[in-house]
Image (tube, rainbow, N blue to C red):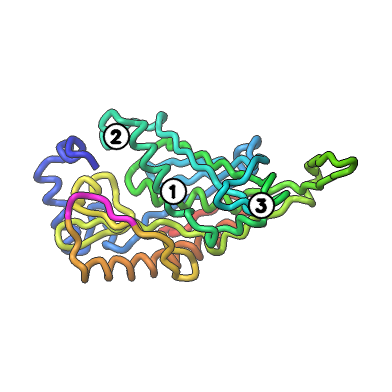
Amino acid sequence: MSSSSKAQLSHGRRQFITDGVTQDCRADGRRCIDFRSFQIETGIVSNTSGSARLRQYGTDVLVGIKAEIGSPKQSSPDAGHLEFYVDCSSYKTTEMDGHVADFATHLTKSLERIYDSQNILDLKSLAIIPGEQVWILYVDTVVLECCGNLLDCISIAVKAALYNTRIPGVSVNDEEGAVELEISDDPNDDKKLSIQRVPVMISCNKIGHRYVVDATQEEECCSSGRLLIAVNDRTNICSMQKSGTGGLDPSTIFEMIETARQAGVLLNQELLQTLKREEYSNNEKCGFFAN
């Protein structure tokens, strides 16, 4: 959060928010460890391999995934890979301070760090001809609106879109020495991705001497430091990043990690249950962490 963003909040308002966090009663009535409710929809963009939309009060995020055949990376010739892109041009806020491209790049790099491991997804299952042809998943995110906690919301929407993604079956013909790939148009040949080890991001924002999860924009303005922790449903910490200029006490860091671990497991479980309900109810809108 830039200094100009902080200036948009009066001293009295910042003090009110900080005092509320100290007393474990935030401005919107939540405790420090409470999340706001979400709504998830999947399969809403027809020209993609998978898609999801997350809405949370003033936040609206749309993710589309396109599977295309291409060349593997030199570092992992027998595996496919993911390419991330975040577009914030539809969303205007003082948080960007006029630097929309920089803000979008920051979000893109954060997603890349979360998924910077072959243990997150079975990328080898995306190989068609190892060393030559693989599936590349282009994960495009559009931020339509935001009311704080944006990276966490994006990570949830990306996981939902991966759950919705279908990879077409491919047959390899190498008659007469020429290799040809034939993509099946039979939906029964499609395969799903396993998202069991895919994490969601839990951001712990330090406000005063305490910290909160799922911060609002106003709370982010009051935050002096933030710990970003990616957690999957197996309680594994997949990545951890610190942002902000303020320091974090070691004991507080351990407490943040444990809180993020517990919250992340619950969030992953609720998300998966919601996605399964939606899948089996013909894309009926479902929410989780509902009041």
Residue 244 lies within the magenta run: yes
Give, as a three-letter code, the residue at label 2. Met
3 or 1: tag closer to the N-terminus: 1
Give, as a three-letter code, the residue at label 3. Leu
Which residue position holds label 3? Answer: 126
Which residue position holds label 1? Answer: 111
52 to the left or right of 212 = right
Q: Nearer the viewer, residue 58 or 200?
A: 200
Using a 10 Å C-alpha cutoff, classify the residue at mark 1 as few (fewer than 14 neighbours), some (14 to 19) or many (20 or more).
Answer: many
Give, as a three-letter code, the residue at label 1. Leu
- Which residue is depicted at the point 37% across and 55% down? 36
> How far separated are the C-alphas under marks 3 and 1?
20 Å
In the orientation shown, which residue stands out farthest toward the front? 177
**Percent from the top left, x then y, of residue 46?**
65, 37
Relative to 198, residue 167 above or below: above
**Percent from the top left, x then y, of residue 160?**
54, 52
The stretch of residues the image draws in magenta is 241-246
SS for dot 2: loop
- Which residue is depicted at the point 64% across and 42% down? 71
* Comparing labels 3 and 2, the label whose residue is closer to the camera: 3
Q: Nearer the viewer, residue 171 or 161?
A: 171
- Report if residue 218 is visible in the image: yes
Which residue position holds label 2? Answer: 96
